[in-house]
Image (tube, rainbow, N blue to C red):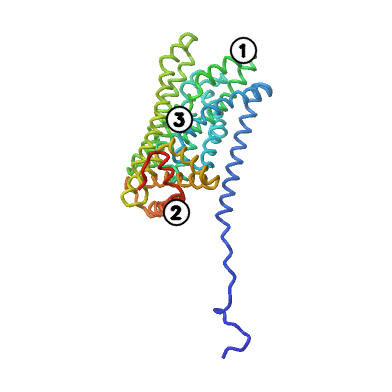
Amino acid sequence: MRSAGRTSYSARVLPPPRPDRRPTLRRWLTVSLIAILFALGGLGMLVLIDDQSGLIATGLGLVLSLLVLGVVVPVFLWLDRFEREPTGMLVFALLWGACIATFSAAVLNNLGSVLIDPMLATHPSAATWVAPVVEESMKGLGPLLLLLFRRREVDGVLDGMVYAGLSAAGFAAVEDVVYLASGFAHSGEQGLLSTFIVRVVMSPFAHPMFTVCTGIGIGIAATTPHRQLRFVAPFAGWCCAVTLHGIWNLGALLPQHGWLVFYVLLQLPLFVAFMTLIVLARRHEATLIARELGEYVDVGRLSVPEVLMLSSVKERRYAMAWAEHHGGVEAQGEMRELQDAASELAMVRARIDRGDRSAPVIEAEEHLLEIVAHLRVRFLDTALYRYYDDRGMTAR
């Protein structure tokens, strides 16, 4: 018989299990390691530039090169408006290009020059043949790492273009610091101005144009059901990027008059083609969202007007303003959450349509459907029909 006052082990009230802090610890260690790596790369580039051109020239180059980021980065954020990528991944891509790709390319390009001609610190052939291979490899490596380690966040070609474009934008900004500082150090204000016109004014999108080819290949690899294409597509995109970069660099070997003709006949058409591709890519994503979300209309998960709103940036903007007007900042935040969840749902549905019916994808679809249903019903219960009336639509 069990003695009085004693409690069996099974009857004791055990304390709740301690939370597993290892995932959080791993995440912070990873973030810290990446931050240290970026800091070392950025510091290394600053030391190289200062050693070649001096502190004042480096400072002027830094200030003027910010204009490249101010022009190029908003274009890729505009491209990312429908299905917004995680901020941390966007920052990773930008800093990879600015800190890691630039420093690695500087070292490898110098090594290539030495291998071509040990008697020269820099060799013209290195800029034409070595630099495109090295720089496109290093710029494309960052987005490729995102594909390998965060594949679920890369939903298609447009995502690959965004990550590759931001990596190239970071690279271009730092490379411009190198050339601007060198121009000022060797030729004063005249050298600084001429370099600014050629690199910042006339060709701010040069590097993104090249590396976007690699990004397209990465986007195809992320979505194709064909195993071989997952390897072939990024390599083919990289080959295209290297080829365009090499052709572009050939123009630098031409005399001034020849370079202007080269710029008008080749570089400007490339820029027009690039901007056309950007616009068409976003239109394609709008069409994809409309098509994929339309599959939920027949089963009553969404209405036709909601799909119209979710597949149009203009209508999304109007819906955000409407939500803020009728429900304040909280309602505006919920509308943004609804739009983001619906965009993600469309991308997950696209994966299913391509044949990916793995358990994580199906679970993601159900989870996103729950979020969309909760937010949608909340708006319908308040005043969403007034939104449709305001826009001349009919909800069902």
The residue shown at (55%, 16%) is 197
Give the class, few, some or many, for how many residues have Cα within 10 Å of label 3's Cα (few <14, many ≥20): many
Q: Position of residue 126 (x, y in %)?
A: 50, 22
Q: Which residue is mark 3?
A: 211
Q: Amino acid at mark 1?
A: Gln
Q: Secondary structure at mark 3?
A: helix
Q: Secondary structure at mark 1?
A: helix
The answer to which of marks 3 and 2 sits earlier in the sequence is 3
Q: Position of residue 296 (x, y in %)?
A: 34, 49
- Mark 3 in CB contact with mark 2 (< 8 angstroms): no
Task: Name the residue nearer the viewer: 223 or 241.
Answer: 223
Q: Position of residue 392 (x, y in %)?
A: 38, 39
Q: Which residue is mark 2?
A: 374
**Cα distance in 3D space between marks 3 and 2:** 40 Å
Q: Which residue is mark 1?
A: 190
The answer to which of marks 2 and 1 sits earlier in the sequence is 1
The answer to which of marks 3 and 1 sits earlier in the sequence is 1
